[in-house]
Every structure is written in C-alpha cells, then in structure tokens.
Image (cartoon, helix red, strand yellow):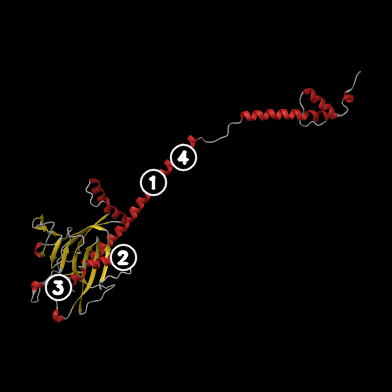
Amino acid sequence: MIFSIKQVFPDRNDLWAGIALLAGTVPRTVRGRLGEASLPINVQRSTLERSNVRTLERPPRSGMTMIELVAALALFIIVLGSLLTILNSATSLWSSSRSQQREQAAAQSLIDLLTDDLQNAVTDSGVPTNNTPTAAKPTFVLDSRTNAPADDVLIMLQFARHAIPHAQGTSPSGIPVSLDAVFYTFAGNALFRHVIPLSYPTFAQAEPLGDLLDEQRAKVENGTLHDQILKALSDPAIKPSADWSYSVLATRIDVLGMLAAIPEAFVRKTLFHKTADARQTAAGLSLPPEYDYLETDVLPDRLDVALRLHSEEDWNTLQRLDGQSTDEADRKRQLLGLKFSKRITFPAQGGSRLP
C-alpha cells in the first residue's frame, strides 16, 4: 500500500516535526504536537550539559590570603611612615626658617636702635670748670663682662643722647637740659633699654653730665624692676614701678658682648680688655686698644656688638643641654640660635656732641 506524504502528515507542522525526529534534534522554532512532546527533554539535557561545562571551566572566586593581606598592610605602613618622615622634616625646616627670620628681624631692630642712640650720643669732652673736677663721673660707661652674676642687673651701656619724644615718663622737676640718659641693661637673659630725661634743679646748681647720669643709674640698677618688666610682657595687669620710658629689646639671649676701641690716653678706668697694647698697622700708625669694660669722658672710635638670640624651641633645647660637657652637647649648642654682629662707628670720633 502506498501512502503519500500528505496523507501521513496532513499538517505541515507535523511534517517538520517528523523530519526533526529523524534527525535527532528539535529546532527551537519548531512548534507542533511532536515537537512539543520532545522539546522539553532535549532542552533540559542540553541546558544541564552546558551548565556543567561552565561550572567546571569557571575559575575560583578571586580574594586575598592572610599572608597577602599582611604583606600589603606592611607595605602600606612603610610607605606611609616614609611620607610622614618627609613631611615632618619639611615642617621642621619651615619652622626653623621662619624662626630664623623672626630672630633676624629682632636682632636687626635692636642694632638699629643702638646705632641711632650712639650716633646721637654726647659727652663732656672738655676739662671740667666747676670747683670739684675730681667728683665728676664718666659720661660714657661700657660693661660687657661675661662673668657677671646671672641674677645681677648688668648696665652694659651708660651715656647721654639728644632728647627724643617719650612714649611714657615725664621730665624730672627742674630745668631740662635737652638730653636723655640712656641705659642698656642685661638681666634674666634679656636686653632692656631705659631712657630718662635729664634736668638741672636750677642753673645755680648745674652739675657735670657724668654726675647727672650717675644719679639716674641707681633707678635702673634694680633687679625687682626688671622682673616686673618681664612679667608685664605676659600679664598686662602688672605695672612696673618706673616713671620713665623703658622697653625689652630681646629675650632668650645667651651671648652678648661689646668691645669699644679707643686710644688709651682717653681711658679713665678699665677692668678688662681684649688688647692691652695698640697694634701696629703701618709706620707711625696703629689701631687703638679694644676694651670690654670702659669708663671715659669721650666717645670711643667704634663699638663692636655680638649677640646670639634663640627661638623658644631652641631655648628649651639649650636649657636641656645645660650642665652637659660632652662633645655632642657642645656641637648641638653651636648649632642653636641666631648669631648676629655689627660694627658701629661714630660720626666724630671723640668729639663733643653737646647741643
């Protein structure tokens, strides 16, 4: 019996489903009664096979072991520590540079003020005409003794200058002589400046300039007064017992020296000196001796000033090194602070500056 394809597969979909069964596969696009019966089985089988292959081929989940984590953390700490060290060094250098600039400005201001005072200084360079010439005191006194007791008030400079406007203080009762007594004092590792107007009680009782200076010296030679001035820097409520102009020029000074050069013939008194005899420079020419303590009635030829200022940090370090005599401690001391020096010359060496 012969059957036609149309009789066996009356529907076109049944035809394609039969072909698919003979081929062993069922296309995903085939829909029909035979396809619907065989499609889920083939799809599930192929899906499971592909899933198993992907599961076997998939690499293990990425992550870090404990050893890798510790190594990474250690490397991070090393890098961070290096950066902090560099930052700390840069900050220290910046702070040191800023401190040096501040101390440099303070030292320059101090020297400028001292130079102005000395450029306007006056002396009694003539022979006293009063009846008691031996009673006249020196008009210029320099005391730069480094071995003076630390608790004492050292009057490093004492002289008279042309009167200047005063921020505080008034002229003593009497007739002003248009001159001020100027005292540079050193106490508590600080340098002070005192300016006191000079006056005569009456013209009938005129006194030599040296005596007028000596009368004012006792006012500033007072340790309690200097302690009050230092405390007033941090506590404005403290009022020092002084009715004249005063100021603190610099604090935290551990080295301060002054040397005056003057011919020996003009020296009234000297306790210490750097050069005892004049130094020959050429035939018939010589340099005058230099003194670190001097009493005279004339102004010296020049004044050399040297000092070392410290920032607060350097000063604390210096205090910790106090008492240590090792080479390392000496090396550290030399590196601390700002060293500053200046030579001040006078406009008319030894001449009178009286107005």
Residue 198 percent across, percent down from the top left:
20, 75
Residue 225 percent across, percent down from the top left:
24, 68
Quadrant of the rendered image containing residue 7: top right
Task: Provide the secondary structure element on which disc 3 rests.
Answer: helix
Is residue 344 positioned above or below 166 on the image? Answer: above
Q: Can residue 127 be seen in this view?
A: no
Q: Using the image, tell me which numbered label, if any, was put on residue 211.
A: 3
The reply to whether dot 4 and dot 1 touch (C-beta < 8 Å) is no
Sequence-wise first label, 4 or 1:
4
Sequence-wise first label, 2 or 4:
4
346 left or right of 314? left
Q: Which amino acid does label 1 sit on?
A: Ile
The reply to whether dot 1 and dot 2 touch (C-beta < 8 Å) is no
Residue 169 percent across, percent down from the top left:
26, 74
Q: Which of marks 4 and 3 is in front?
A: 4
Sequence-wise first label, 3 or 1:
1
Q: Using the image, tell me which numbered label, if any, was put on residue 233.
A: 2
Quadrant of the rendered image containing residue 11: top right
List the residue tagged with mark 1: 86
